[in-house]
Image (cartoon, rainbow, N blue to C red):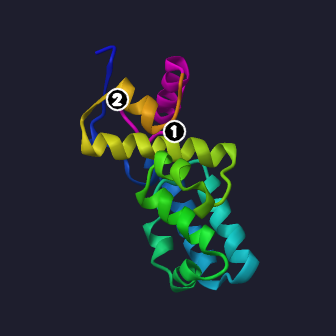
């Protein structure tokens, strides 16, 4: 098992797995309903950095966020959509289409990528993870996996 990681996606708790995360997501959704302009853009960045929020579909469905898709702030929409449905590798391949990621955002996207890969394949070789996460060091990869586990949404 040294070369593989087993993740049981059916054991992953929703929205970070705790009531606090659900409440925090609800608060962001309520704020987004009345936010416009720079306040909405800042809210999106806060959601992407929030440590226990890993679900973004509710926000993407909001009309004022959908409006960002084709406007001058499309990078905000694209980045939120990436966190909902994309991978870290997709970000690296077209980084000009997205916001510059902070360290917290990068880690979160890497964690979400691990989960996305695990949903597709229950057993993920280290080589695949190293490539998808663009990590060159196995020890660093293991640290990212451990962080994902301690974040409370990935169970190995």
Q: Could you tell me which secondary element the residue under label 1 belongs to?
A: loop
Q: Could you tell me which secondary element the residue under label 2 belongs to?
A: loop
In the image, 156: left or right of 70? left
- Relative to 54, residue 156 above or below: above
Residue 129 percent across, percent down from the top left:
41, 32
- The question of residue 155 being in magenta is answered with yes
- The question of residue 43 being in magenta is answered with no
Kindly identify the residue that appears in the image at 69 percent across and 48 percent down: 102
| Residue situated furthest top in the rendering | 2
Give the Cα separation between the discs numbered 1 and 2: 12 Å
Crowding at label 1, few (<14), some or many (≥20) Cα neighbours within 10 Å? some
Classified by dominant secondary structure, the portion drawn in magenta counts as helix
What is the number of callouts on the image? 2
- Relative to 150, residue 18 above or below: below
Quickly name the residue at label 1.
Answer: 151
Quickly name the residue at label 2.
Answer: 156
Crowding at label 2, few (<14), some or many (≥20) Cα neighbours within 10 Å? some
Where are the magenta residues, as a range?
A: 137-156
Sooner in the amino-acid sequence: mark 1 or mark 2 = 1
Residue 118 percent across, percent down from the top left:
31, 40
Camera-side residue: 53 or 21? Answer: 53
- Relative to 91, residue 25 above or below: below
Residue 37 percent across, percent down from the top left:
72, 82
Q: Can you tell which quarter of the image residue 137 is in?
A: top right
Give the position of the N terminus as an image quadrant. top left
Q: Are marks 1 and 2 in contact (CB under 8 Å)?
A: no
| Residue situated furthest right in the rendering | 38
Residue 56 percent across, percent down from the top left:
48, 64
Kindly identify the residue that appears in the image at 51 percent across and 81 percent down: 66
Kindly identify the residue that appears in the image at 62 percent across and 82 percent down: 71
């Amino acid at each position: 098992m040294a070369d593989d990681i087993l993740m049981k996606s059916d054991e992953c708790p929703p929205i970070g797995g705790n009531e606090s995360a659900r409440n925090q997501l609800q608060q962001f959704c309520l704020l987004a309903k009345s936010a416009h302009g720079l306040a909405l853009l800042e809210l999106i960045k806060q959601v992407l950095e929030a440590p226990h929020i890993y679900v973004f579909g509710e926000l993407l469905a909001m009309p004022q966020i959908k409006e960002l898709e084709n406007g001058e702030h499309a990078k905000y929409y694209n980045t939120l959509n990436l966190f909902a449905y994309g991978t870290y590798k997709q970000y690296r391949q077209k980084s000009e289409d997205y916001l510059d990621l902070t360290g917290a955002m990068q880690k979160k996207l890497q964690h979400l990528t691990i989960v996305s890969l695990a949903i597709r394949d229950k057993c993920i070789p280290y080589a695949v993870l190293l490539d998808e996460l663009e990590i060159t060091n196995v020890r660093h990869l293991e640290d990212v996996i451990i962080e994902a586990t301690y974040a409370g949404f990935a169970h190995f």
